[in-house]
Amino acid sequence: AQSVTQLGSHVSVSEGALVLLRCNYSSSVPPYLFWYVQYPNQGLQLLLKYTTGATLVKGINGFEAEFKKSETSFHLTKPSAHMSDAAEYFCAVSDNTGNQFYFGTGTSLTVIP
Amino acid sequence: ETGVTQSPTHLIKTRGQQVTLRCSSQSGHNTVSWYQQALGQGPQFIFQYYREEENGRGNFPPRFSGLQFPNYSSELNVNALELDDSALYLCASSKALIGSYEQYFGPGTRLTVT
């Protein structure tokens, strides 16, 4: 069975500050991990994914995440927050068949000018 | 390249009624997944269709059913609607390729059950 826990349902950062959104997963098989962003009244957009290979994954809009197997974590970071980053962020896990995705409950990011 | 589209955008139904939601896949995608996103929650996997057959199912009762058509578009049907079925229903399409599994989401259908 697989599951995702996102620590912190709300995160606020100042514009230009580091963004860190936390995600821990549980999986009985090697996981595929994803981060999605959702803007109000829109669907989800893929930011980045980890399947195999390099554990530091770079995505769109300056975001990156590192897969740490020993910590069962896949935290999302961005060095400098921009106002346009304000949105809901979801971490998701899948097995290597891609048949089922399990999403966390989301983290709402607020960027303070 | 056309993205994932869903219809209708909004829908209001009465408890006990039936509803059909529709999804058109992104061009070149052969797999469709449906999710239910309750207010303030993450998407919950309902089921996935590949080549017109159900290819995985989440923890949803049989009154949630689906179809995939030869052009890879899909329908989600919900019978005997309950108040808790009120949610945003998301459709996502993908290519069934090893090592891929990127899902592209539509904007969703907002279902309100009264």
Image: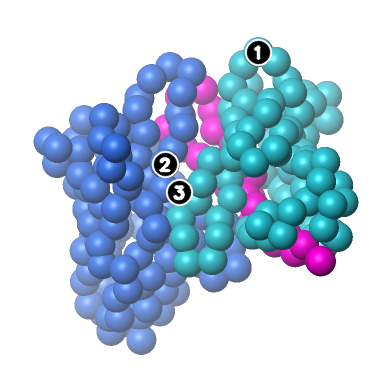
* Chain that is coloured blue in the picture: B
- The image shows residue B44, relative to residue B39, as above or below, that is above
Please give the residue where the numbered disc 3 appears in the rendered image. B45
The colour style of the image is by chain
- Chain A tint in image: cyan
| Residue at image point 43% right, 65% down | B88
Report the span colored magenta.
Answer: A89-113
| Residue in the image at 84% along x and 52% along y | A16
Q: Is residue B69 left or right of residue A57?
A: left
Q: Residues within 10 Å of mark 2 (few under 14, many from 20)?
A: many
The residue wearing badge 1 is: A53
Dot 2 amino acid type = Tyr
Instruction: Check the image and name the residue furthest to the left.
Output: B70
| A13 relative to B80 in the view: left or right | right
Question: Counting other residues with Cα less than 10 Å from the Cα at mark 1, is it few (<14), some (14-19), or many (20 or more)?
Answer: few
The answer to whether marks 1 and 2 mark residues whose Cβ atoms lie closer than 8 Å is: no
Q: Which mark is residue B104?
A: 2
Image quarter in which the N terminus of chain B is found: top left
Can you see residue B24? yes
Kindly identify the residue that appears in the image at 81 percent across and 66 percent down: A112
